Image (tube, rainbow, N blue to C red):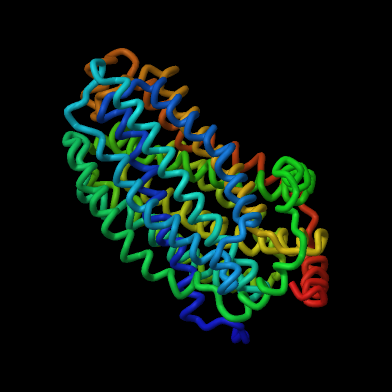
């Protein structure tokens, strides 16, 4: 299908590589951080949970407030060059790259119980820095999507690149670091973090053409600067208006379900490989995660083509949600390496659909919000979506910690033999706990949120088309 788009394919691919850059860090973060501090360093599960709850509490403040300030603050580059998001992307991304490395630079000489509180303080401090800079980068980069790409066809084309490259970044993060990390050598996590740190600068260079604000966008910023915006109102007034909009709430919940499920799968991967497959060397990790990449690569072009023909973002989103629920059923019972390869391939197909459909659907929501308010303020809405999604990190830590506490997991023993020695009568029950936080809880989350989305989301293709016509009339 040939479409006439405002932006070139090079810009589409460059903007899509934003997903690869983000996943290169967030996937490695989700895979290693909790496991490293709990199983390798030996931080007690309860304190590891508290650290993530503090991290999530900071998100309650950080994400929506950052989105609000991005629309409220008028920086020199906005007045002089009418650039809004691009400078903030630079300000957020580079320290974010550095903050990831800081997480794994905790002194290896520190060991519980003598140094427990030092480790705990380092963990919390590095998590807060990581989240702060990521939020600045992420909200500004994703806020460009509905403004830079205005038609549903171009949004889907761009997100086709984003899905392929994002899942590629996710799998590369697992495969490359998986060849370095060894559970029996704590310093290997630091070596892997240095590789992620260096690769991040290369990937960041790829996104710069895509996130640069073009002449048309800068002209719109100049016209809209004179208009009063929601961000000129108090923060809590804006918050009430955003969250009072039912379609926005439903979209946030749907996004939360998918994000929380994926966060649990990512964080559970090392537990599966180490304790279910009994592979502390991580040799299974590239194979299993590679199967997810193959599933995503095969399915994403189909998701793009079918969505262009169906032209109904709600139907496609529901289809992806149902398929993801189905993928968790065999995952809950998989035992051998090849069974996990097959289940992760199916999960990759569903992940490709969820990943692909999210930005176009959010674009419809932001178009509708702009028609209602008479102005575009995507940073505010993405700030609150980030706030909602970040609860997935708290839920991930809560589910894993509670499952481990309830099933007798012993912190500080990163091998199956170590767990068996410490808990000879109940280590099999510990395996059940891993299956619960890997597949059972994620399946329930996605199922419930998909049902809510199906029943309550009300933006039809006809209404979305009407909104785009009204936005053209408004000049926004």
Residue at the spot x=69%, y=59% of the render?
377
**Which quarter of the figure has residue 123?**
top left
Q: Quadrant of the C terminus?
A: bottom right
Q: Nearer the viewer, residue 67 or 423?
A: 67
Q: Nearer the viewer, residue 431 or 115?
A: 115
* Vertical relation: 228 (above or below) 107: below
Q: Quadrant of the N terminus?
A: bottom right
Is residue 443 visible in the rendered structure shown here? Answer: no
Is residue 71 visible in the rendered structure shown here? Answer: yes
- Percent from the top left, x then y, of residue 438? 45, 36
Total labels: the figure holds 0
Residue at the spot x=37%, y=44% of the render?
29
**Which quarter of the figure has residue 147?**
bottom right
Q: Nearer the viewer, residue 45 or 356?
A: 45
- Percent from the top left, x then y, of residue 363? 67, 63
**Which quarter of the figure has residue 146?**
bottom right
Residue at the spot x=69%, y=70% of the render?
310
Residue at the spot x=41%, y=61% of the render?
20
In this picture, residue 167 sits left or right of residue 247? left
- Percent from the top left, x then y, of residue 386? 58, 47
* Vertical relation: 15 (above or below) 62: below
- Percent from the top left, x then y, of residue 185? 16, 36
Q: Nearer the viewer, residue 285 or 71?
A: 71
* Vertical relation: 69 (above or below) 471: above
């Amino acid at each position: 299908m040939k479409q006439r788009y405002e932006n070139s394919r090079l810009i589409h691919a460059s903007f899509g590589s934003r997903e690869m850059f983000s996943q290169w860090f967030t996937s490695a973060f989700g895979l290693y951080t909790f496991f490293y501090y709990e199983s390798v360093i030996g931080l007690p599960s309860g304190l590891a949970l508290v650290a993530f709850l503090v991290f999530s509490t900071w998100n309650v403040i950080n994400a929506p407030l950052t989105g609000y300030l991005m629309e409220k603050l008028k920086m020199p580059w906005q007045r002089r060059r009418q650039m809004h998001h691009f400078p903030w992307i630079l300000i957020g991304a580079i320290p974010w790259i550095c903050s990831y490395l800081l997480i794994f630079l905790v002194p290896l000489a520190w060991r519980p119980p003598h140094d427990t509180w030092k480790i705990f303080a380092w963990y919390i401090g590095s998590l807060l820095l990581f989240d702060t800079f990521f939020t600045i980068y992420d909200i500004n980069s994703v806020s460009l999507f509905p403004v830079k790409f205005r038609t549903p066809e171009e949004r889907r084309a761009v997100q086709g690149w984003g899905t392929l490259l994002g899942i590629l970044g996710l799998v590369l993060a697992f495969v490359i670091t998986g060849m370095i990390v060894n559970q029996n050598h704590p310093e290997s996590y630091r070596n892997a973090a240095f590789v992620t740190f260096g690769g991040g600068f290369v990937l960041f260079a790829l996104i710069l053409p895509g996130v640069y604000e073009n002449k048309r966008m800068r002209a719109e910023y100049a016209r809209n600067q004179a208009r009063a915006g929601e961000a000129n109102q108090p923060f809590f007034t804006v918050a009430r208006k955003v969250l009072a909009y039912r379609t926005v709430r439903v979209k946030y919940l749907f996004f939360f379900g998918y994000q929380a499920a994926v966060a649990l799968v990512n964080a559970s991967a090392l537990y599966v490989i180490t304790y279910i497959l009994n592979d502390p060397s991580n040799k299974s990790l590239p194979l299993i995660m590679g199967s997810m990449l193959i599933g995503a690569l095969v399915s994403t072009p189909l998701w793009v083509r079918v969505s262009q023909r169906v032209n109904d973002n709600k139907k496609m989103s529901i289809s992806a949600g149902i398929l993801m629920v189905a993928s968790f059923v065999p995952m809950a019972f998989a035992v051998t390496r090849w069974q996990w390869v097959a289940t992760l391939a199916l999960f990759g197909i569903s992940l490709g659909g969820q990943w692909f459909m999210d930005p176009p659907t959010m674009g419809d929501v932001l178009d509708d919000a702009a028609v209602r308010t008479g102005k575009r303020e995507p940073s505010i809405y993405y700030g609150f979506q980030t706030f909602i999604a970040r609860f997935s990190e708290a839920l991930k830590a809560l589910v894993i910690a509670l499952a481990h506490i309830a099933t007798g997991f012993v912190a500080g023993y990163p091998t199956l033999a170590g767990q068996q020695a410490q808990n000879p009568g109940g280590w099999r029950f510990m395996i059940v706990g891993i299956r619960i936080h890997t597949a059972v809880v994620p399946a329930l989350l996605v199922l419930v949120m998909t049902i809510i989305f199906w029943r309550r989301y009300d933006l039809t293709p006809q209404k979305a088309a009407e909104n785009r016509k009204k936005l053209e009339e408004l000049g926004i």
